[in-house]
Image (cartoon, helix red, strand yellow):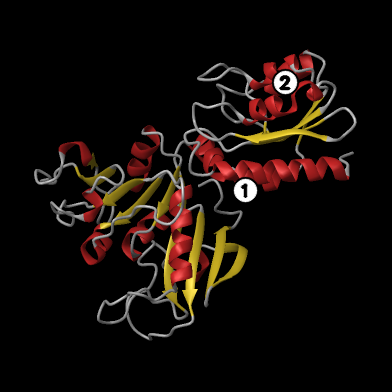
Amino acid sequence: MDTAADITAMRRAITLAARGLGSTSPNPVVGCVILDAAGRPAGEGFHQRAGGPHAEIHALRAAGDRARGGTAYVTLEPCNHTGRTGPCAQALIEAGVARVVYAVGDPNPQATGGADTLRAAGVKAEQGLLADEAETGNAAWLTSVRLGRPYVLWKYAATLDGRIAAADATSRWITSPESRADVHRLRAEADAVVVGSGTARADDPQLGVRGIEGAVQPLRVVVDTGAGAVRPGARVLDDTAPTLIAVADDADARHLPEGAVLRLPRAATGPGLDVPALLAALHGRGIRSVLLEGGPTLAGAFVAAGTVDKVVGYLAPVLLGAGPAALADAGISTITDALRLDVTETVRIGPDLRITAVPGPARKGN
């Protein structure tokens, strides 16, 4: 039976893991806490960057000899392979750890098997403590491994009556400075930020992270099917971060930097590009998480494709009564087909309300 000390240690490991969000891709975020043989804190650590030491190694270094006979709490099953770093399962064995408690099994076929290696060496290995919390914290990487595509978080900002702009197309600013600052946190945690041609034309966005020290700039992606929205001199083409302009196979993109052009097939039905093809191309470039900031048309295409994993809406205490809605056609024609969401969090951000929701069980895994 898990004790209060076990739960406290694993919850600390989950908190530590979150510190790696935005800097570990294409690796997972992982936290580790080590208690000595007497149950006292001995060391802790988290995976800080891809190619660097894993969480277990940081924790073992901090614990030193106090790890011998102790317990390691890890948010993800210790890896069992040698990549840019050695196998963590073997490092735990060599350190003399007597027990390893891990929250989530590793679904990566190249790295799984750490628990079996531990048990074969006489180390007690247990799975499942606070698994749901650990899954939530590592949702992007787990989704990318299990589904073979990046995790998609769709973010939008709207009035209380669901408008993202006024009837005359003005939209700056519906939400507060506090909400806009919070969006930069979402950008800093994502591998890529994706917008559509409408956003590119209307706002000429730069899409970089601002105001967050040490943030890794995400890849900037503009879905510009006809290659007509992004022109030379556009802010998204500056040197702040790398950029991809996704265009149709047959589009004339000679005015764009050759290295920035990503050619994709058009959608089989409706306008725009094939969303699964876009996500597959990004996944092939090591992108494990996407922040979808595009307008209602692009958001509708992603929802229709069943590829939205989380929704974060910033609702301002404002009414417009007219203007574009946050979501355009998503292939839903009747109420029985509505995409039902489970609200996981509601938070006040300045004067606004931030609502976080995920698709209900019937849509998970699409």
Q: Amino acid at mark 2?
A: Leu
Label 1 neighbour load within 10 Å: few <14, some 14-19, many 20+: few
Picture quadrant where residue 142 is located: top right
Q: Is residue 324 left or right of residue 141?
A: left
Q: Which residue is mark 1?
A: 136
Indicate the quadrant containing the N terminus: top left, top right, bottom left or bottom right: top right
Q: Is residue 228 above or below residue 76?
A: below
| Image spot of residue 77 (x, y percent) | 67, 29
Which residue is drawn at the image coordinates 77% and 14% (left, top)? 120
Q: Residue at x 50, y 47 (%)?
A: 366
Camera-side mark, 1 or 2: 2
Residue at 23% across, 66% down: 202
Q: Toward which corner of the image does residue 219 lie, by quadrant?
A: top left
Please indicate, yes or no, whether residue 252 appears anywhere in the rendered image. yes
Residue 317: % across, % down: 49, 82
Residue 36, compared with residue 10, is above or below; it is above
> Judging from the image, what secondary structure is the residue with disc 1 in?
helix
**Residue 92: which disc?**
2
First-in-chain label (1 vs 2): 2
